[in-house]
């Protein structure tokens, strides 16, 4: 079910998304939170796409948010999460820097690779 929320004030989360200092154009950025007062629903989700220069701006109501890049191009980079609090008429800056994800395969050989015989 879609909810309609009007934004009052000029609170915003803005910043950059980069990998190795290079802008990640068109990546999706989300800010999740806060819950409406007295609600048992999921946190509200706000989002936008990153501009060609790696910048983004998300207008939000005042509150505490988790900011993230939900998935990277080709799912190769991990960006982590940033928790921020935004007040009425405030702008909070967030820089999300991607890192190469570890390979999907493991160096282990079999399910017992961590087990070592004690010579019993």
Image (cartoon, rainbow, N blue to C red):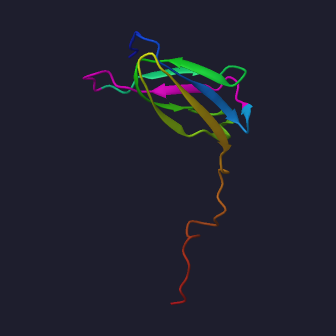
Instruction: Indicate whether 46 appears above or below 108.
Output: above
Q: Is residue 35 magenta?
A: yes
Instruction: Indicate whether 21 appears above or below 56.
Output: below
**Residue appearing at x 39%, y 12% in the figure:** 5
Q: Is residue 57 magenta?
A: no
Instruction: Indicate whether 80 appears above or below 48.
Output: below
Which residue is farthest left?
A: 38
Query: Hey, which quadrant is residue 107 in on the image?
Result: bottom right
Left or right of 68: which side holds 54?
A: right
**Residue appearing at x 51%, y 31% in the figure:** 67
Instruction: Work out whether residue 66 or residue 2 is closer to the camera in this orientation and state it.
Output: 66
**Residue appearing at x 50%, y 90% in the figure:** 120
Query: Hey, which quadrant is residue 109 in on the image?
Result: bottom right
Give the extent of the magenta segment.
23-40
Instruction: Work out whether residue 43 or residue 106 is closer to the camera in this orientation and state it.
Output: 43
**Residue appearing at x 45%, y 23% in the figure:** 45
Left or right of 56: which side holds 87?
A: left
Query: Hey, which quadrant is residue 23 in on the image?
Result: top right
User: Where residue 99 sits: x, y (%)?
Assistant: 66, 43
User: Where residue 87 sits: x, y (%)?
Assistant: 41, 22
Left or right of 62: which side holds 119?
A: right
Tell me the quarter of the image containing the N terminus: top left
User: Where residue 6 sits: x, y (%)?
Assistant: 40, 9
Q: How many marks?
A: 0
Instruction: Work out whether residue 120 or residue 68 is closer to the camera in this orientation and state it.
Output: 68
Which residue is farthest bottom?
A: 120
Instruction: Work out whether residue 20 or residue 120 is closer to the camera in this orientation and state it.
Output: 20
What type of secondary structure mainly makes up the magenta span?
loop
């Amino acid at each position: 079910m879609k909810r309609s929320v009007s934004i009052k004030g000029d609170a915003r989360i803005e910043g950059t998304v980069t990998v190795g200092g290079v802008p990640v154009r068109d990546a999706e950025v989300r800010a999740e939170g806060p819950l409406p007062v007295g609600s048992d629903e999921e946190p509200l989700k706000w989002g936008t796409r990153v501009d060609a220069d790696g910048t983004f701006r998300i207008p939000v109501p005042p509150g505490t948010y988790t900011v993230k890049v939900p998935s990277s191009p080709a799912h190769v980079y991990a960006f982590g999460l940033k928790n921020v609090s935004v007040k009425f008429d405030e702008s909070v800056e967030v820089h999300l820097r991607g890192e190469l994800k570890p390979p999907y395969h493991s160096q282990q050989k079999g399910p017992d690779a961590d087990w070592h015989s004690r010579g019993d």
